[in-house]
Amino acid sequence: MQFRNIGTIFRKELKDTIRDRRTMLFAFLMPIISMPLLMMVIFKVQMAAFQKIEGARSEIVIQNVSQLPQELRDSLMTDTTFQVKTEADFAGKILMDELKQKAFQALVIVPDNFAKAIEMESPTDIEIYYDRAEEMSAVAYSKLRDVMSQYRDRIIKSRVVKRQISEDVLKPFEVQGNSVASAKKLAGKTLGGIIPYFLILTCFLGAMSPAIDLGAGEKERGTIETLMVAPATRGEFVLGKYFVIVLTSVMAGLMSLASMTAFFKYMAGDPAMKQMAELLAIQFDVQTVFLILAVVIPIAGIFAAILLSLSIFAKSAKEAQGYVGFLNIFLVLPAFVSMVPGVELNYQMALIPVVNVSLIIKNAIAGTIEWNYVITAFVSLFALAALALYFAKRWFEREEVLFRM
């Protein structure tokens, strides 16, 4: 095996890949530009919808409103965030059924003698029914709880003053929570599950298009036979093509990481996201970037070898796309593990491909790197990449596969 031949094949295939507009579009522009734009649109739409719900008037029904204390009744009636109705507005109808059918957002049931119980300082309850699955209903319930809590606090304060007791007796002590987590760790744990998934997905997409073109595409163009008469071994051809696919996969992943970082920084500076600005403040130091690169390269190598093997096996590019689309579920879906709460990197997880990469990137972003697990994952990934490459080479050497028509 001559490295000069591998280099020549690599340069030739790389030039052809760069010249192919379709390959460049699907490998780089689509995942790098469309994904951040899609995430931005989703964020903006969600924030706009939430603000619209928060600002809308909540329609509530108060059953037995006459039993409310005057102060609480006035608070609800004059609150501009509520549109208050009574059971008289729904005469002949079952209020609970009307609530389920979204005729209004919340139902307040006031018990008999509620105002008298408050006056006599007797224990009593007030019930609020709402639909937790509906955002507007949940917001209405939250607003009602705030109003009720404020009224309850005023009652407690008046009772304390009436008995000439210090208000401090109601608060014997305060609990003060002080988090020791750094901003980097907080942001990493929050977004650390999203970034690895998109990074791994982009690596797969970056390898997919060139792999199909360099295998099944050669068959469709009728150039695979021409390559076989060139003064190079089958193994050299495989390595030349393989390194091109790995390069495009890694570059797509890194460019995707850069675009996502820019996206999160932009969102952190958005006034509408000021409450989440700290969570969106993702920072990458040199060590984090190198660690991400170190695990992205072998996973890209695994993707490249598997995709090249499928592409060589396929009769046409269309058939190869069908195989790859089905394979995408099994290769990329495990990256979702990093989004599952409580799942941490250990020796077992470090041996599972894709899962280990996802968890390592998540920990690297959060700044909680455990090198014993990283080294275990790194060795297992390179071993699996080498095994997949060996299989691709043997696959390429079989005439019945290479010239499968």
Image: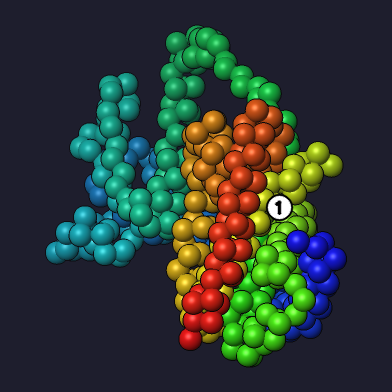
The residue under the point 41% across, 51% down is 138
Give residue 203's quadrant in the image.
bottom right
Q: Which residue is at the front of the view, 258 or 111?
A: 258
Q: Where 365 falls versus 250 (above or below)?
A: above
The residue under the point 72% across, 66% down is 236
Amino acid bearing label 1: Ile
Q: Where 56 falls versus 196 (above or below)?
A: below
Q: Can see residue 389?
A: yes
Q: Which residue is at the front of the view, 187 or 25?
A: 25
How far across and how far down the image is residue 95, in percent? 21, 57
Q: Where 2 falls versus 194 (above or below)?
A: below
Q: Which residue is at the front of the view, 27 or 113?
A: 27
Give residue 367's quadrant in the image.
top right
How far across and how far down the image is residue 12, in percent? 80, 77
How far across and how far down the image is residue 362, in percent? 63, 42
How far across and how far down the image is residue 301, in percent? 66, 56
The residue under the point 52% across, 9% down is 172
Give residue 13's quadrant in the image.
bottom right
Q: Which residue is at the front of the view, 294 or 363?
A: 294
Q: What element carries label 1?
A: helix
Q: Can see residue 209?
A: no
* Extreme-bottom residue of the structure: 221
The residue that disc 1 covers is: 297
